[in-house]
Amino acid sequence: MPLYMDVHTITGGVTVTDVAQAHKADLQKQGEHDVNYLRYWVDEQHGKVFCLVEAPSAEAAATVHREAHGLVADEIFQVQEGC
């Protein structure tokens, strides 16, 4: 299954606690779309969130975010994992 990295910019900033709650919501919704959110990273200082996800398409990954909490990524990149 393809692997994607999405990037969110949260105006007004973001906290690790808020992102953890959003990730929890993603995990509850992902099975409906054959998506698997794997990990996330947070840059509180710059209001950035990065999510790593296995999904059949970028659109499926975005749908999970939209339905789970409404925070759709600004950009989604298909990526390949290296060593």
Image (cartoon, grey):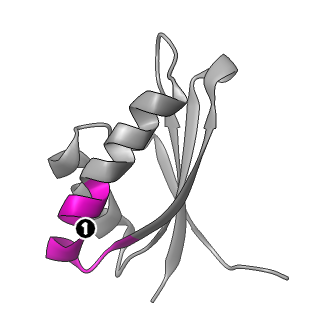
Question: 67 or 78, which is in the foreground?
Answer: 67
Residue 74 position within the rendered picture, expressed as x and y whole percent measured from the top left: 45, 40
Is residue 40 magenta-colored?
A: no
* Residue farthest to the right, as pictured: 83
Q: Please identify the quadrant where the N terminus is shown.
A: bottom left
Q: Main secondary structure of the magenta part?
A: helix
Amino acid type of the residue that numbered disc 1 sits on in the rendered structure: Gln
- Residue 45, by quadrant, is top right
At x 57% / y 23%, what residue is drawn? Answer: 47
At x 21% / y 75%, what residue is drawn? Answer: 31
At x 44% / y 37%, what residue is drawn? Answer: 19
At x 85% / y 82%, what residue is drawn? Answer: 83
Question: 52 or 60, which is in the foreground?
Answer: 52
Horizontal side of residue 35 vs 41, given as left or right: left
Residue under circle 1? 30
> Which class describes the residues within 10 Å of circle 1: few (<14), some (14-19), or many (20+)?
many
Q: Tell me if residue 28 comes above or below residue 42 in the rendering.
A: below
Q: Tell me if residue 66 comes above or below residue 39 in the rendering.
A: above
Residue 64 position within the rendered picture, expressed as x and y whole percent measured from the top left: 24, 58
Residue 62 position within the rendered picture, expressed as x and y whole percent measured from the top left: 31, 56
| Circle 1 SS class | helix
Horizontal side of residue 44 vs 2, given as left or right: right
Is residue 30 magenta-colored?
A: yes
Tally the numbered discs. 1
Horizontal side of residue 33 vs 10, given as left or right: left
Residue range in magenta is: 26-36
